[in-house]
Image (cartoon, rainbow, N blue to C red):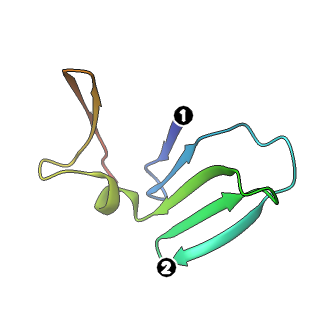
């Protein structure tokens, strides 16, 4: 899994699987799209206006691994 963030356009993409086949993009809202394969496999999630969607109250993306917390600043 990999998260890419483009601060210039404020877009993030969470890649769950490498795209190995044709995918269909489903627009869930004005701020979120999902790439899905014909078999239902989700390949990725695109977040438009990402810093609004992915940040907690201090403006950081929070990743928790076991008992460790990591904060990544998202600045547009």
Where on the picture, by quarter, is residue 24? bottom right
Position of 13 relative to 68 (above/below): below
In this view, the residue farthest toward the bottom is 30
Q: 7 or 23: nearer the eye?
A: 23
Q: Quadrant of the N terminus?
A: top right
Pick out the residue farthest to the left.
57
Mark 2 Cα shell of 10 Å, populated few (<14), some (14-19), many (≥20): few
**Disc 2 to disc 1: CB gap under 8 Å:** no
Q: Residue furthest front?
A: 39
First in sequence: mark 2 or mark 1? 1
Residue carrying label 2? 30
Q: Secondary structure at mark 2?
A: loop
The percent position of residue 11, horizontal first and vertical second, equals 49, 56
Q: Quadrant of the C terminus?
A: bottom left
Which of the numbered marks, if any, corresponds to residue 2? 1
Q: Is residue 74 above or below residue 45?
A: above
What is the x, y in percent for residue 7?
Answer: 43, 49
Nearer to me, 37 or 56:
37
Percent of width and height locating residue 67 = 19, 21
The residue depicted at 49 percent of the width and 78 percent of the height is: 29
Residue in the picture at 29% in, 62% down? 52
């Amino acid at each position: 899994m990999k998260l890419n963030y483009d601060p210039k356009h404020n877009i993030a993409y969470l890649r769950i699987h490498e795209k190995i086949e044709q995918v269909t993009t489903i627009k869930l809202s004005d701020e979120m799209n999902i790439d899905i394969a014909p078999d239902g496999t989700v390949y990725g999630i695109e977040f438009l206006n990402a810093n609004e969607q992915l940040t907690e109250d201090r403006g950081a993306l929070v990743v928790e691994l076991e008992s460790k917390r990591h904060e990544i600043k998202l600045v547009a």
